């Protein structure tokens, strides 16, 4: 709107393709996306239905110990 076209080097008879819209510029949302990993643990439990981690079902002690030892 306020650009000085003489500084752009546009030649006489040159065709230009204008892109864009004359509509109002869309504004960014007030609140950005929130990822589940960023929620507090209490809200993650509500969203997922359970908390994170392994549950000891009574027969998984050996598996838990091997996973733990493999991580060390």
Image (spheres, helix red, strand yellow):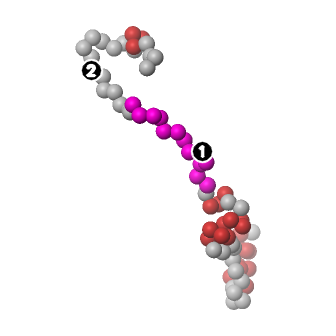
Q: Secondary structure at mark 1?
A: loop
* Residue 3 position (above or below residue 50): above
Q: Is residue 48 left or right of residue 58?
A: left
Which of the 4 quarters of the picture holds residue 64? Answer: bottom right
Residue 15 disc label: 2
Classify residue 55 by image quadrant. Answer: bottom right
Camera-side residue of 7 and 4: 4
In magenta, the rendered stretch is 22-34
Q: Quadrant of the C terminus?
A: bottom right
Circle 1 residue: 30
- Placement of the N terminus among the 4 image quadrants: top left
For disc 1, the neighbor class at 10 Å (few under 14, some 14 to 19, many from 20) is few
> Residue drawn 27% across and 11% down?
12
In magenta stretch: residue 23 = yes
Name the element at disc 2: loop
CB under 8 Å between discs 2 and 1: no
């Amino acid at each position: 709107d306020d650009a000085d076209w003489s500084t752009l080097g546009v030649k006489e008879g040159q065709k230009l393709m204008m892109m864009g819209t004359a509509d109002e510029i869309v504004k960014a949302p007030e609140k950005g996306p929130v990822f589940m990993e960023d929620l507090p643990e209490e809200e993650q439990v509500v969203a997922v239905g359970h908390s994170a981690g392994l549950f000891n079902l009574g027969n998984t002690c050996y598996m838990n110990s091997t996973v733990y030892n493999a991580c060390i």
